[in-house]
Amino acid sequence: MKITAERGYVIPAIGDPYERCAEQLAKSIEKFHPTANITILTKDQLPYGDLGGYANDWQVFYASPYRQTIKLEADMICAGPIDHWWSLLQLRDVVVSVGARTFYDEPARSR
């Protein structure tokens, strides 16, 4: 895909209810970052078609319109600013997060 901006967030939303979840995530990002570049990636925008679930994740690299991309899961919500992630991630080519934490900063016990 053609690069349209330096930095942006990509939210894959393959099927319902993920499309609705992605819209809510985008709104929560815009609440703290009104000028953020956000792309909701739907099944029709996958360059190699819908391969199912996590098998689609690698396609974000080819579908992102940003030179630097943060891929977010559609079922997330932003409860505060996240722009500091750019400085945390800028020294790495790829960062994969593992595990989840609660808002008490404790390891999550459920998925």
Image (cartoon, grey):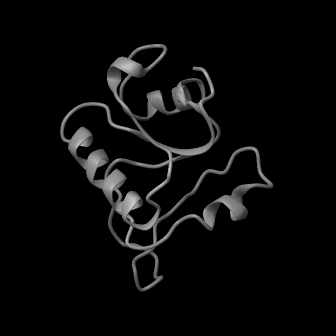
Q: Quadrant of residue 38?
A: top left
Please tell me whether residue 22 is drawn above or below residue 80 in the rendered image: above
Q: Residue at x 50, y 45 (%)?
A: 37
Q: Residue furthest right?
A: 91
| 67 relative position to 91: left or right | left
Closest to the observer, 4 or 109: 4
Q: Please state the horizontal and vertical placement of residue 50, each as a whole percent of the image.
A: 37, 19
- The image quadrant where one finds the N terminus is top right
Q: Please state the horizontal and vertical placement of residue 21, each as a whole percent of the image.
A: 25, 49
Q: Please state the horizontal and vertical placement of residue 15, each as a whole percent of the image.
A: 24, 31
Q: Residue furthest top?
A: 48
Closest to the observer, 17 or 27: 27
Closest to the observer, 54 or 25: 25
Q: Residue at x 44, y 35 (%)?
A: 54
Q: Residue at x 36, y 72 (%)?
A: 109
Q: Residue furthest front?
A: 35
| 6 relative position to 28: left or right | right
Q: Residue at x 32, y 67 (%)?
A: 110
- The image quadrant where one finds the C terminus is bottom left
Q: Quadrant of residue 104?
A: bottom left
Please count the marks in the image. 0
Closest to the observer, 21 or 50: 21
Q: Quadrant of residue 13?
A: top left
